[in-house]
Image (cartoon, rainbow, N blue to C red):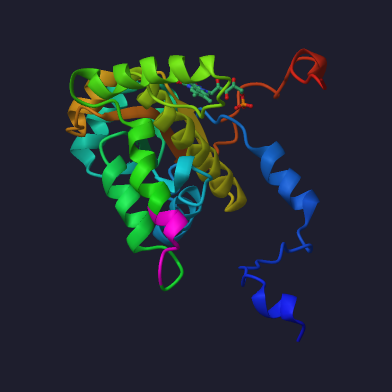
Amino acid sequence: MSSSDQTEKKRYFEPAPQDIDVENFKKVLKSRRSVRKFTDKAIPAEILDDCLDLALLAPNSSNLQPWTFYVVQSAAKKKQLVKACLSQLAATTASELIVCVARTDRIDEMAKKNISEFPFPQAPDAVKKYYRFIPYNYKTGYFNALGNFKKVAFKMARQFNKQLPVSAFNPADAKLWASKTTALACENLVLALRAHGFDSCMMEGFDEPLVSQILALGEQQYPVMVIAAGERATDGVFFPQYRFDRDLFIQKV
Ligand SMILES: Cc1cc2nc3c(=O)[nH]c(=O)nc-3n(C[C@H](O)[C@H](O)[C@H](O)COP(=O)(O)O)c2cc1C
C-alpha cells in the first residue's frame, strides 16, 4: 500500500445501479394522470405504506424533512375533508385522502436528529457544525426578529460580492421553503401509487383554514395539497394529456 493510500481519507461509496428499466420508468411517469373518478377498490394497507415510505425518500432541503402526511381514514374526518375539498369528484370517490403538510415548526428537532441519527457511528464534525448553523437559515424568529436581522446582514454581505444561499427572511419564505420540498415528496407518492397500479389526483382546490381545522394543525403547519388516491375508474380520466411546445419551457443558455 502506498503512503498516499494510507493517508487518503476513507470515503463512503454507493454504486449507482445500471440495470434500471427505463421503459418501465417512463411507463410509470407517462401513465400517471390526474384521475377524477375512482372505483370502490381499496388500496391494500401494505401498498399504501410502501408508497408513503417511497414519498419520504424524496430529496429535501438539508435533509430536514419538513413534512407530515396525514392519511385520513376516520369516516367522520374523511367526510369533513371531502367537504373541505369542495366535494370534488376525485375526493368523493377516492378510497384514500392524504393531506400533505409542509411544516416549519420542527426545524430544530430535525437538525438535532441529523446529528444523532447520522448513519456513521459518529457524525463528522463538519456535519455537527452544519446542523448547528442551518436552522438559523430557515427560521425567522419571534416577531420575525431573526428574519429582519438576516435581511440586513445579507444586504451588507452582498455589497462585498459574497454569494449567499436561499434563506427565509419572513414566515412566507419559510413556508415556501418547506412547501417546495413537500411537493417533491408528493410527486414521489403519486408515482409510487402508479407503479403499484393505483392512481391519484393532487388537489389544491380545498379550503385551507378548514383543512387545518379538521386536522388541528399548528400555526407553522401548512397543507400544501390533498392527494386523492384509489383505483382509476374506466371513465376516471377526462381527456388526453397535453403539454405545450417544449421550447416554451426549456432554454439552453
Ligand atoms: C398543485 C396541484 C394542484 C392541483 N389541484 C387540483 C384540484 O384541486 N383538482 C383537480 O381536479 N386537479 C388538480 N390538479 C391536477 C391538474 O389539474 C393536472 O395535473 C393538470 O391539469 C395536468 O394533467 P395531468 O396531471 O393528467 O397530466 C392539481 C395539480 C397540482 C400539481
> In the figure, residue 6 lies in which quadrant?
bottom right
When the figure is inspected, residue 204 is found, relative to residue 186, above or below; the finding is above
In the picture, measured across the screen, residue 81 lies left or right of residue 138, that is: left
Residue found 48% across the figure and 48% down from its top: 55
Quarter of the image with the C terminus is: top right
When the figure is inspected, residue 211 is found, relative to residue 23, above or below; the finding is above
Residue nearest the observer in this picture, 142 or 9: 9
Image coordinates of residue 119 in percent, x first then y, are: 45, 67
Residue nearest the observer in this picture, 121 or 251: 121
Q: How many marks?
A: 0
Residue found 65% across the figure and 66% down from its top: 14
When the figure is inspected, residue 56 is found, relative to residue 159, above or below; the finding is below
Q: Which residue is outermost to the bottom?
A: 1
Residue nearest the observer in this picture, 140 or 19: 140
> In the figure, residue 234 lies in which quadrant?
top right
* Magenta stretch bounds: 122-128
Quarter of the image with the N terminus is: bottom right
Image coordinates of residue 120 in percent, x first then y, are: 46, 70
> In the figure, residue 250 lies in which quadrant?
top right
Residue found 19% across the figure and 18% down from its top: 143
Residue nearest the observer in this picture, 98 or 19: 19
